[in-house]
Image (tube, rainbow, N blue to C red):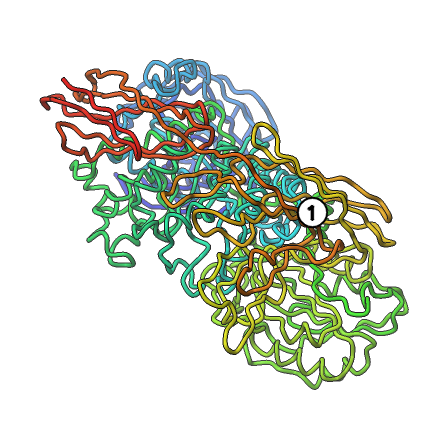
Amino acid sequence: MNKTILCIIIYSVVSYYAVFPQQKGVIAVSASVNANQSALTLDGNSSTSWMLTAENVKDDHFLMFSLQTPSDVKGLVIESVGITNRELRDLIDIFVTYDPMNFGDAVKYTVGGENNMFTINFLPKYGAYVKISFKGGIVNKSISINEIDIVYDEKKRVQREMKEQPWRDPQLPVDKRVELLLNAMTPEDKMELLREGWGIPGIPHLGIPFLNKVEAIHGYSYGSGATIFPQSIAMGATWNKELVEKVAMIIGDETVSAHTLQAWSPVLDVAQDARWGRCEETYGEDPVLVSQIGGAWIKGYQSKGLLTTPKHFGMHGAPLGGRDSHDIGLSEREAREIHLVPFRHVVKNYDCQSIMIAYSDYLGVPIAKSEELLHGILREEWGFNGYIVSDCGALGNLTSRKHYTAKDFVEAANQALAAGIATNCGDTYNNKDVIEAAKKGELNMENLDNVCRSLLRVIFRNGLFEHNPSKPLDWDQTYPGWNSPEHRDVAREAARQAVVLLENKNNILPLSKSINTIAVIGPGADDLQPGDYTQQLQPGQLKSVLTGIKAAVGPNTKVLYEKGCEFFSQERYEIDKVLAVTGKSDVVVMVLGDCSNSENMQGMVKTSGENHDLATLVLQGYQQKMLEEVCKTGKPVILVLQAGRPYNLSYAAEHCEAILVNWLPGQEGGYATADVLFGDYNPAGRLPMTFPRHVGQLPLYYNFKTSGRRYEYSDMEFYPLYPFGYGLSYTQFSYADLKTEVLSDGSVIVKVKVSNTGERKGDEVVQLYITDMYATVKTRVMELKDFERITLASRETKEVIFKLSPYDLSLLNDKMDRVVEPGEFKIMVGGKSPSYKAADRIKDSVGFQHTSEGLNGIIEYPLSYSADFDIEYTGMEENLVNHNKNVFVTVKNKGNLTDTGKIYLYMNDNRSDEVHHFELDPGQETKINFEIDKNTEIQNLTFVTKYKKLTIDY
């Protein structure tokens, strides 16, 4: 265990402060001699000790422990070498006191135990300090005190805490407990609550628990030894909600084993630019795919009683030029159609208790200070009732460091507090000037109290004052259940399901296991890349593609290996060795792509991950050149792209016999890749992102809107190399009997039969797309609405049924109202995204060209849907707490579709600064409160929504 030790000399006594386990309940230990050893009595290690030498025992000495919280102490457990039960009884006096300057009388105690382990019992005594005095001259030999545990009277502690700290009473309502605690907190306490330190640091003297957190997008990423699953982009490529939920449950189990409560995961960014290094952390480019896969992860992880923190809210996935957090200036329409969709989905369906903001902006305002996004949309529209976490440094970025909206950290803190940000990862709420400003009342204390409330509600609501699973992480321990055989099996299955087969010319795959010679070449061949946010690796934990191939082939097959070059650096290029093994082989497997690994790895240059964006999408370093040289030999080349993003594979598509993408496949990725190469598993992954022909096409995503001119470039066609949703199989599928039905409630039932017409068992990812042909605004040429991964035996047929709600068919019209407009919709179901002709009348061309790809249908949707918000004034009352008047109005949706809105207050014909958002389902209503200064003379109040107003005269 790493310890931070501070030495403070007071009256010739040295106190040592250490990071002790909370269950020890001690914040400092002092000793009269050999003080540098005193902390060892609390380190949990029996082989270390505080020593009294034979010379020391001639005089009086002591150990003194400062308790985290004053408590009722009723005993000690002492592990000591070199002393008997009787000698210990004669040797020590024990004092428990609240005043370290006046210890009073020693307690009367009994000693039990033998063989170096002694139990000391006495009547409970309340105090903040425990002192053990060692009387000189009692023994004449050296003594070692190895471990000391202080035993507390839990019953008395609880009774005392209930009386002195009434917020600890679990029988009280949550809001009552929050207010009791908030009233007891000093400004310094409140700022300490908001400081991030591997989670919520806790405030011991108030009983506020320490809450541990972890990054967990593809496994428990702290310490060493947990199971490493495929990176998020690979999980998106599985298109398998049930599998993702299962993976998240296992990550949850390993989180529980490590005594951790919360994951700053998953990433729900919709990735729209392959240059962006953080593509690997996402589930892809489509909001429905990200919503469904991300929701499955949250469902699985939270089923273990844990908290999730989806991130990065909200427009993080479309940076300008692919450069991380370089804002492109997205409109509200684009935000609501694409980037906010996954966050809305998980907040409304999975009761997430916290959420992390992005570094980017919303409508020109940095999200770290956006009240519109963080309060109006997140809390008022979606009903989020948790607390908001800042990404690391995002609050400090409000200063001249980045955004220039705040002149100093105090102003940045006030802006963030106004937006409702609680936990601050970074350097603002813990800034000494900010803390001093809080003490002086220079921060907005109402905003400070509100963000503290948001965090305290979560802690109380989840019973964490009473049952806190968090313990400080032992970074050197492999916890029980980590990386078990069962968990490794799931990691391998996830990696197999993620593999996307892009090319398979002449059915070269699967390979025979008895092939004579295979050359395995490339920097990734024997250096599997697991992705960013990976823990410190255990020796041999990552199973490379080379390892997998060697394990898969028969005993007579020769496997030749050459690295050839580095991922990025141009220091090594051993093309002669590469060509030599190529010449000896029957087939070449080249493993090329990204370098993205644990931050604990030294001496590597990453090409993917956080802050590792690319200007080009050509394979980095000498990788592209080496691929071309090997292909020129005429030997059949199979490219394994081990990457966290799409690459330009135009050359490979023309010259390689097969291409498969195994992404950043987790620790079992080598075995999983070999399973696919040699036919032990039939690939069925589908692309979660579009693969371009050239970086100049970016941003390039499948669900684009119609162009006002042409689509192609003068020097390049428009079409991608491989479209979203695409992937091959070792078997074949066909679609038949597409049927649609519009029900009376406006929903649409879509049925289709899918058959495996080949000779192998295989999975098909059945994807449902729609095209809204004519609308009052431009709509996307196609949109994914649902999907299902199914398994079919050879010659087996299954019927797949989807149901579209009116909301699924809705759009934001020219007034930004959500509506369903009657008219023609294309309904397309297939194994990839539909094709199209990039020219005039593009929507007419959208569809599948053959039943092996999918089927097309058309419905004439006859119904109209929209919201209709009604306003009702429900009264005014005086608030005796804040000395204001509360004015209440009820908004009800009398329409037939869910939508959002805003309501404004005009008082005496002057508009109030206060505005409220709402989102209401049909028939739903909400009560909204406006605050008015009690001294204001009111002549009239007018409540205004987009289309209605209500005036009340006084």
How far from the left and from the top, in percent, is residue 293?
59, 44
Q: Is 218 left or right of 788, judged from the image as shown?
A: left
* Left or right: residue 73 compared with residue 825: left
Mark 1 is surrounded, within 10 Å at the Cα level, by few (under 14), some (14 to 19) or many (20 or more) other residues, namely: many
Measuring 62% from the left and 71% from the top, which residue is drawn there?
649
Q: SS of the residue at dot 1?
A: strand
Q: Is residue 113 above or below residue 418?
A: above
Confirm whether residue 538 shows in the render.
no
At 65% from the left edge and 62% from the top edge, which residue is drawn?
Answer: 528
- Report x, y in % for residue 457: 39, 27
Q: Amino acid at mark 1?
A: Val
Nearer the observer, 103 or 891 = 891
Pick the front one: 103 or 391: 391
Image quarter hosting the C terminus: top left
Per the image, the residue denoted by label 1 is: 766
In the image: residue 449, left or right of residue 851: left
Seen from the viewer's position, the closer of residues 149 and 479 is 479
| Most foreground residue, 285 or 7 | 285
